[in-house]
Amino acid sequence: MSGREDDVYVAAAMYYLQDETMDAIARRLGVSRSTVSRLIKRARDSGLVHISIEPRTAGSDVVSRTLRDMFGIEAHVVPVREGATDVQRLDQVAQVAGRTVSAWVEPGTVLGLAWGTTVSAVVGHLTPRRAPGSAVVQLNGAANPVTSGIPYAGSIMTAAAEAFDARVHHFPVPAFFDFAETRAAMWRERSIRRVLAVQERADIALFGVGALTGTLASHVYAAGYLDREDLEQLRATGVVGDVCTVLLREDGSYEDIALNQRATGPTPRELSRIARRMCVVAGTAKVSPLLGALRAGVMTDLVVDETTARAVVERVRNHRGPRIGP
């Protein structure tokens, strides 16, 4: 261990384990108080220190149990201060999700990511840790008629892989093909089949839910992936959002939605084969698509802000609907 790394360890141990003040640590190391603050921050950022807060607030704990009882999932409900903006709400939820996923990743783990605004935020909060032999695989295509999608989706995959020293497997196909026949033909290509095989070996899937409306627009609806005619058709057929670019109604149905024949992401049925599936959601504009995802059975774990979680519970109690399941 280098001298600087040793100082990081000593500062972290004294601060978190021995409850020493920064002034006492500065005297012990012969450095300034501001240097101690930087050493402690480095200990957190590097993953040397993992911070968790237990128990949760009484209110969020009740909502977590309610969601678990309703849908058979593990719900991580994140309290967010009143008056927080949608961006601030997303950042708070992404911090919890990033630390949780990081704790799951071990050597040899295959982590599947569905690109999007929410997953991008989560990746920014992953705790760096070496996981030899691990891999990060893209779950849905990113290209559209306007752009290749590579700079956006590629940056998310690369950042996640760098956090764990993992290998990246990109998925070089559109988010939606123009023709279902083209998709079927591409799925027979060896280069595509290789990525699909990695997806099938995924141990963890990380994804958000896209919403057709909201102040923090979902990338798939705001960046040219669907034209006006497509969007009008989706609204007419009751679509409220998507998971991995597979479109859903609030009741969890998706199989009869024509556009899904051209989508490249895994269906809820295909996702259900992955042992651990984390869905991350922030903002009440996503209540309807989140309900669709819950009823379709796409997740084992949910990280969600408390306001949105309460809105979901209230909506279910007032308007009970069938659970479609994968």
Image: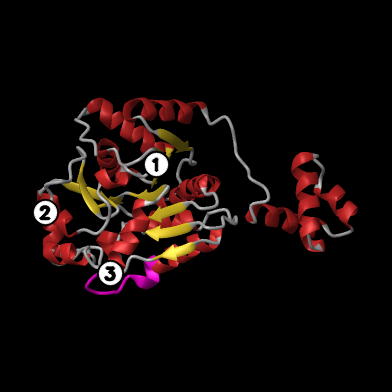
Which element is circle 2 on?
helix
Q: Is residue 212 visible?
A: no
Where on the picture, by quarter, is residue 177? bottom left
Residue 186 visible somewhere in the drawing: yes
The kind of residue on which mark 1 rests is Ala
Give whichever of discs 1 and 3 has the lower sequence position: 3
Residue 275 - label: 1
Q: Which residues are magenta?
A: 144-153
Q: CA distance from mark 2 to mark 3?
A: 19 Å
What residue do we see at 17% from left, 54% from top?
A: 260
Q: Residue 298 magenta-drawn?
A: no
| Quadrant that contains the C terminus | top left
Q: Is residue 275 left or right of residue 131?
A: left
Marker disc for residue 258: 2
Instruction: Say above or below: 276 vs 40.
Output: above
Could you classify mark 3 by the number of other residues whose Cα lies within 10 Å: few (under 14), some (14-19), or many (20 or more)?
many
Q: Residue at x 21, y 46 (%)?
A: 248
